[in-house]
Image: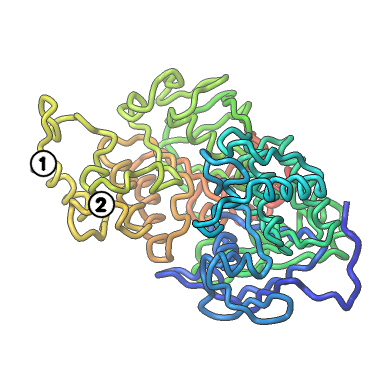
Amino acid sequence: MMSQNLPSSACPVVTVCQVTKRYPGIIANDQVDLALWPGEVHVLLGENGAGKSTLVAMLSGLQQPDEGHIAVGGRVESLSSPRRARALGIGTVFQHAMMVPALSVVDNIALGDPWWRRPARRHYADRVNAIARDIGVRVNPFALAGSLSLGELQQAEIVRTLLRGSRVLILDEATAMLTPDNAHELGRLMRRLVAQGLAVVFITHKLNEALAWGDRISVLRRGRKAGEIGPERLKSLTAPQTTQEVVEMMFGIPGQAAATPAAAAAAAAPAPKTAGKPVLEAQGLAVEDPLVPIAGIDLMVRAGEIVGIAGIDGNGQKQLAEALAGQRPVAGGQICLDGERIDHENIGQRRRRGLRYVTDDRLGEGTVATFPVSINLLLKQIGDTPFWRRGIVQPAAIARHALRQILEYDIRTPAVDTPVGKLSGGNIQKTLLARELSGQARVVIFAKPTHGLDLQNTQSIRGRIRRAAGAGMAVLLISTDLEELLELADRIAVMAQGGIIGMVENNPAARGRIGELMSGAMT
């Protein structure tokens, strides 16, 4: 269902003009243009690291552009804070709920009121009920936020945003944590909101949601706007045609010229090599998950081989990696390492066999931010000799080990006892690699290993992955960066909806074949 076309005299509610945002070593947004129209669901697509979150942060007043400007109602404005953005009618509902769990919905709404004034609970409750009724949802204004389901909490967040007079509603990865039924209900709610004249910005990485609910689709790639499909063209295309165009914009397939010489070099497939015997095998692997269950996974990685996993993020890649690493229970099938079943073994047992996992959440899951670099290098060896003897820590042994790893992996840190959270993202990632590649590693699973890193660190990490395979390790490389997979992998599997839909040998025709598989899976 599409919203009615607006008259030609209508103006965008918000216009983003040539906006650029830089961080040390990386350009997060590069001369991005965007127009948000009333009565439209404007879908913003792009893989992780494409620049979506940075753009949302600037529209929400959390960050300010280094170049370019943002206009609201045709007037250039400085969105200097979230309060200023809300005052201009721009409301954002983030992926993770921002309400205080121990407070009711109305008390969460009243949090910004003057502290000396008694909260106007009844007034807010009446407003919540009226808005909820207008947009066709049910929200109990006196329910504790912590007692609500994810879908109910999201609806309450949307009502709170509309209560503040928002003309633009930004939904940032709004379906990432929702069940399919809740996501479908959110889609119907967006259609009701735009029917009332709101401009809705829907950030997602799921093509099926973009096709189902969008009036306009914009794609970000490597910080730049790769293209846009407007309402008229969107209506004229079939679903397969739209999918093909979006995939081409997101991944540069088929045949799109590389944006930089470095990207052109990366597009060249690695030289063919003879891989060794199978090391890691999955047969009929199934994992239960309320969002993306996986089933029927058959996969084999040989010694000295890099097998890539491609696909739109959120199609079961994380579930697969965690099941192989021992972080999720297996619901069916089996996992073998060197021909022996390991699916019944825990993380520590698999690690001692030589299976290692480099998570994509380097700071939240992979390391403990407040612990020193030296301890983070040994997180999975706590209590082992020679670093602990009879339960007593051996500081000198830990420091010597840390110094060796820091030198070998070029970890830039002031000292071995510096908290790892104070390092740059690239150096945190080097710390992870040093820990997981050391010792008797036989097979290493990398999940988006260069996500969010600058070019220098990206090339350094990719070099480490090549050398690991060159040393005979079996490497499973999960990445949403197709150029990275084409540069490193010997074979590339494509995942969609919790399954592997094809395996492609990395050769000059691989890019087009991967595009065909991804396009077919999303229609």
Q: Image quarter for residue 309?
A: top right
Q: Position of residue 33 (x, y in %)?
A: 67, 74
Residue toward you, 93 or 284: 93
Q: Which residue is mark 2?
A: 419
Residue that appears at 43% across and 60% down: 453
From the viewer's perspective, is the residue at label 1 or at label 2 nearer? 2
Q: Image quarter for residue 147?
A: top right
Residue toward you, 30 or 404: 30
Q: Secondary structure at mark 1?
A: helix
Q: How many marks?
A: 2
Residue that appears at 73% across and 80% down: 74
| Neighbours of disc 2 within 10 Å: few (<14), some (14-19), many (20+) | some
On screen, residue 128 versus residue 355, left or right, reads right
Q: Position of residue 486 (x, y in %)?
A: 54, 54
Q: Determine whether label 1 and label 2 are within 8 Å by CB.
A: no
Q: Position of residue 417 (x, y in %)?
A: 18, 51
The answer to whether one can see residue 264 in this image is no
Q: Label 2 is placed on what type of residue?
A: Pro
Looking at the image, residue 312 lies above or below residue 319: below
Cα separation, mark 1 vs mark 2, equals 16 Å
Residue that appears at 68% across and 66% down: 89
Residue toward you, 363 or 187: 187
Q: Which residue is mark 1?
A: 395
